[in-house]
Amino acid sequence: MHHYETIELEINHSIATLWLNRPEVRNAFNNHVIVELMDCLQSIEHQPEITAVVIRGRGKTFCAGADIQWMKSFSSMSHQEDFQENIHLARCFYMIYTYSKPTIALVHGAAFGGANGLLAACDMAYCLSDTKFAFSEVKIGIIPATISPYIVKRMGEFNARELMLTGRRFSGEEAAQKGLVNATFSSSEALSEYVNQISQELKSSAPGAMSNCKDLIFNITKSNNFNETIDYTARMIADARASEEGQEGMSAFLEKRKPNWVASANANVN
């Protein structure tokens, strides 16, 4: 397994946990973190024994956003160099958003600025109720640009307008109410228990079907024209039924047994 300096990878019971591991700077990210994060995600994406990926932060904070030293370096960059740094970060968020395996963010402590891009790009995000969030970029004269596609998708236009324009801090409770996270929990124990339940549900789902489901959602949400989705969705379900997984899943259902991917997941646990 590759050794990383800024992140840490754990694989347990077919769930990969990717830890942001810079607690001394509240897991703030820089270009090195982004490189390692993308490399790690690429290295495990096609490992069949891994069902899902959880992103977390070591220490007291999920992620405080961009590293201060990294931000200072922008002043000495050319416009083109600055642009390329931003492209790299945007591609990291897009990789998470389009990742073939289910992704889950577990958020605690704080999620400021670009940290919200990490969690919002995940399929699911959960937090502790006392977590502090902020899109604080406007407070220092910039904008939350690369995270905005994922924030607006999660929260909707006008919730995003309020929180991006004011840059104010808000709680985990409000983050859940406005849709930035799927749910909030009052204790770490309750949060962990719920995510364990979600993980068990994912293990009982067909890996290929989950990946295709993510593609389906991605493609149908690109268009507001339902007429354009008719052929695409009809073809997707026909392909799914004809696939090896589809045939196995339907046979298992009719024969009142568990499909082979469940047996495989259980074998990985044992």
Image (spheres, rainbow, N blue to C red):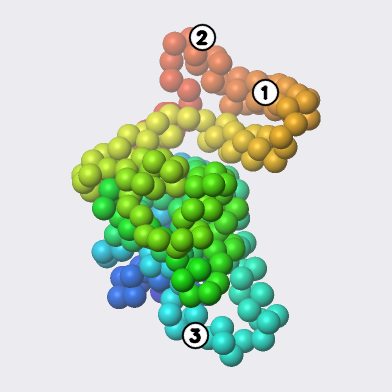
Viewer-nearest of labels 1 and 3? 3
The residues tagged by marks 1 and 2 sit, at their Cα atoms, a distance apart of: 18 Å
Mark before the other along the chain sequence, 2 or 3: 3
Q: What residue type is labelled 3?
A: Lys
Which quadrant of the figure has residue 18? bottom left
Instruction: Look at the picture and state if 4 lies above or below 74.
Output: above
- Residue 254's tag is 2
Q: What residue type is labelled 2?
A: Leu
Q: Residue visible at 61% across and 74% down?
A: 85
Residue extending farthest to the bottom is 76
Viewer-nearest of labels 1 and 2? 1
Label 1 sits on a secondary structure element that is: helix
Residue 10 in the image: x percent, y percent? 36, 56
The residues tagged by marks 1 and 3 sit, at their Cα atoms, a distance apart of: 50 Å
The residues tagged by marks 2 and 3 sit, at their Cα atoms, a distance apart of: 62 Å
Crowdedness of circle 3 by 10 Å Cα count: few (<14), some, many (20+)? Answer: few
Q: Residue visible at 59% across and 62% down?
A: 146
Please give the count of numbered marks on the rendered protein.
3
Label 2 sits on a secondary structure element that is: helix
Q: Which amino acid does label 1 sit on?
A: Ile
Residue 90 versus residue 132: which sits nearer the camera?
132
Q: Name the residue under label 3.
A: 72
Which quadrant of the figure has residue 62? bottom left
Q: Residue visible at 50% across and 68% down?
A: 138
| Quarter of the image with the N terminus in it | bottom left
- Residue 237's tag is 1
Mark before the other along the chain sequence, 1 or 2: 1
Marks 2 and 1: in contact by CB < 8 Å?
A: no
Residue 199 in the image: x percent, y percent? 38, 38
